[in-house]
Amino acid sequence: MNEWILRLDEGPADGPRLAVKDAIDVAGYPTTVGSPALRDRAPAAADAPCIATARAFGARIVGKTNLHELCFGTTGLNPAFGHPANPRWPDLVPGGSSSGSAVAVALGEADVAFGTDTGCSVRMPAACCGIAGLKTTHGRISIDGVWPLAPSFDTIGPLARDVAGLVLGMQMLVPGFSIEGIRPATTVGRLAAPPGVPVDPTFDAAVDRALAAAGFASEPVALAGWDRAASSFAVMIDFEAWQSSGRLLATGLVQDYVARRLGPCEQVTTEAYTNARRTATTWTAEVLALLQRCEVLALPTLSHAPVPVGDKAVMGNGLNLPFNVAGTPAISIPVGPNPGESLQLIAAPGGEELLLATAAVVERAVGTLPRLYTG
């Protein structure tokens, strides 16, 4: 299935099994970031802080997972290391960039997987593979020892089969993490997608059914500045991606599908980047103001179903990236049997506990997708 770049077995035999995206340093092993340009990299001298914390919790590290090269893509495909196959819908992309992490969890090969999310890369593969994923608040989890894509947006988060697994993942990342005694949201804003991001109406319907089944009376809400989020994200990720990975193009080893995306990033000017940061600040203020009125915002994770595997495959992340710009936590859980039917919930920074408590209510009402494995 090509979900693994390296299989390991480190830690207590009875510890929860943890898969690690191969953009995160594990001491003694190279971090390839799914790139032929980094395949011969020296082994990491130390664990990334998130891995050290997971080890202290008692996690058993079972391998490093495949990904969209350099974390720079949404399909999760990787010709050089083999495409991770979507185990639930094999003809469709697994979603990126944390594709191998999602596949390992969906197959039952790990209890939790760590991924990174810069513009969708935990939530999208979770939705594409029918599991749960949590993008954490920007800055809550250290990204030291993690290959940077765009540090202004980069986050680490867990993927798991269900909400309980995400709680376990957060316990690995944050000592003492718990949702015991945390009440679910009482005010839920049903966020409308912007006109420029057409959403599959069956996805909207699945979200509405799930909220109703869980007993949430949601209030229709909107945000005016989606275009500001998209424009600032595009400029900032390109500028920062060039700083972090542009030098690799000189090796001639970056795969074409990523090189074509990375090459033009060199053209983004410092002035454009500075202006984009100002625009991002305006968008963030708008999101945080709405989150003072509604504890949680609800919308689909994906605007369209996972696309078929192929060289021309593209997945849109217009419903995801705005919340990387805002720095808020966001969770994705499946809410229907069809490919990509998932609910995305957003909370104010630091609101992971609230999101998980709220998502647990929805999950109890609609259930999880059937296991693809026994045991």
Image (cartoon, rainbow, N blue to C red):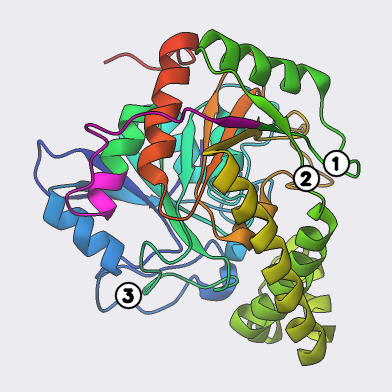
Gap between marks 2 and 3, in whole Å? 34 Å
Graded by Cα atoms within 10 Å as few (under 14), some (14 to 19) or many (20 or more), the crowding at tag 3 reads some
Q: Nearer the viewer, residue 213 or 56?
A: 213
Q: Nearer the viewer, residue 145 or 45?
A: 145
Instruction: Check disc 2 and report the residue beneath it.
Output: 316
Q: Are marks 3 and 1 in contact (CB under 8 Å)?
A: no
x and y percentages locating residue 221 in the rendered image? 73, 35
The mark nearer the N terminus, 2 or 3, is 3
Gap between marks 3 and 1, in whole Å? 42 Å
Q: Nearer the viewer, residue 185 or 97?
A: 185
Secondary structure of the residue carrying tag 3 is loop
The answer to whether 64 appears left or right of 302 in the picture is: left
Question: Residue extending furthest right?
Answer: 195
Locate the C terminus and report the quarter of the image it occupies. top left
x and y percentages locating residue 302 in the rendered image? 70, 35
Q: Nearer the viewer, residue 104 or 213?
A: 213
The mark nearer the N terminus, 3 or 1, is 3
Q: Residue at x 68, y 36 (%)?
A: 93
The answer to whether 342 appears left or right of 160 in the picture is: right
Q: Are marks 2 and 1 in contact (CB under 8 Å)?
A: yes
Q: Which residues are magenta?
A: 170-189
Instruction: Check disc 1 and report the residue beneath it.
Output: 197
Q: Say if residue 299 shows up in the picture.
A: yes
Graded by Cα atoms within 10 Å as few (under 14), some (14 to 19) or many (20 or more), the crowding at tag 2 reads some
Instruction: Check disc 3 and report the residue beneath it.
Output: 43
Graded by Cα atoms within 10 Å as few (under 14), some (14 to 19) or many (20 or more), the crowding at tag 1 reads some
Secondary structure of the residue carrying tag 1 is loop
